Amino acid sequence: MAIRKILLPLTGTAAGEAALATALMTARIWSAHVTALHVRVDSRDVAPLAGEGLSGAMIEEMMSATEKESADRAHAVRGLFERFVAEHNVLVAEAKYESGVATASFASIIGREEDLVAQQARLADLTIVPHPEAGEDVSSSDALHAVLFDSGRPVLIAPHLAPQRVGSRVCIAWNGTAESAASVLAALPWAHRAEAVRVLTSDEYQRRGPGAADLLTYLALHGITADIATFRPVERDVGAGLLKAARDFGADLLSMGAYSHSRLRQLILGGVTRYILENADLPVMMSR
């Protein structure tokens, strides 16, 4: 299945420009439409958080300050979008498929970001999110996890810096789980057009389920030629080993399942998903 609609949530972080570049690069590959979405904070949500003991005037002042800050951020995000598409000669238009043409549009809505982004992502072929800011705990990124857990669609985490290419050399991380099976399905359109495809596997990564050789047979039925690379953990970290194997291949897209173990376990103990989210320097497409 070709990619026709890309959702790009923008919040005004410094990583937003790299995400925009990644989204527009992807749109040009697939003749797709990018919907840049900014979710403004609803000032009414501040009132329940204000706590007891505050006067009505104080709560009103807090709501007013929140509204101004939200409006200023929305203005800045829209400015970033407009400058970027102008500099890169991107056609700003309504979503409409035309072969060889990438289009983009901007939308701003009010509400809870994690809820609205996940809902909008359900009718997008791919959601591209900015890389978390340095020092931000990626495990608490509500919007990112809402898309992963509640949209039913793949999410691509853009790197800190805009990539030179996306999807010409594709790695598929395989461990036999339902999550990695979903990642294979998401990777099929990319694998069909890639110049090289590699399946990454490891004894420490594998769970109960089909092995990497079975995946190669499956890919061959789809007309995709791939090879297998077995990686080892780096300093006992499976995620570090997986990322090193992708870099060694020169991958410009890594497709993998997310949270084969529970999210709570990964929050406490760490895990492959968390390591990749925090340390990847290439586009990573995750599926649940």
Image: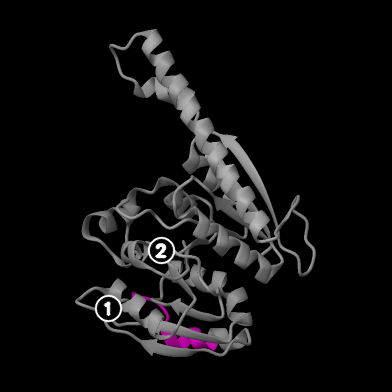
Q: Earlier in the sequence, mark 2 or mark 1?
A: 1
Q: Which residue is mark 2?
A: 258
Q: Give, as a three-letter code, the residue at label 2.
A: Ala
Question: Disc 1 on helix, strand or loop?
Answer: loop
Give the residues drawn in magenta, as a range: 207-217
Residue 121: where, in percent of width, then height? 58, 51
Look at the image and say whether residue 228 sits in the magenta stretch. no
Look at the image and say whether residue 213 sits in the magenta stretch. yes
Residue at (56, 84) in percent of width and height:
219
Residue 208: where, in percent of width, then height? 35, 75
Q: Give, as a three-letter code, the residue at label 1.
A: Glu
Question: Disc 2 on helix, strand or loop?
Answer: loop
Q: Residues within 10 Å of mark 2 (few under 14, many from 20)?
A: many
Identify whether 134 is placed above or below 238: above
- The quadrant of the image that shows the N terminus is bottom right
Please give left or right for residue 213 compared with residue 195 in the image: left
Residue at (38, 85) in percent of width and height:
248
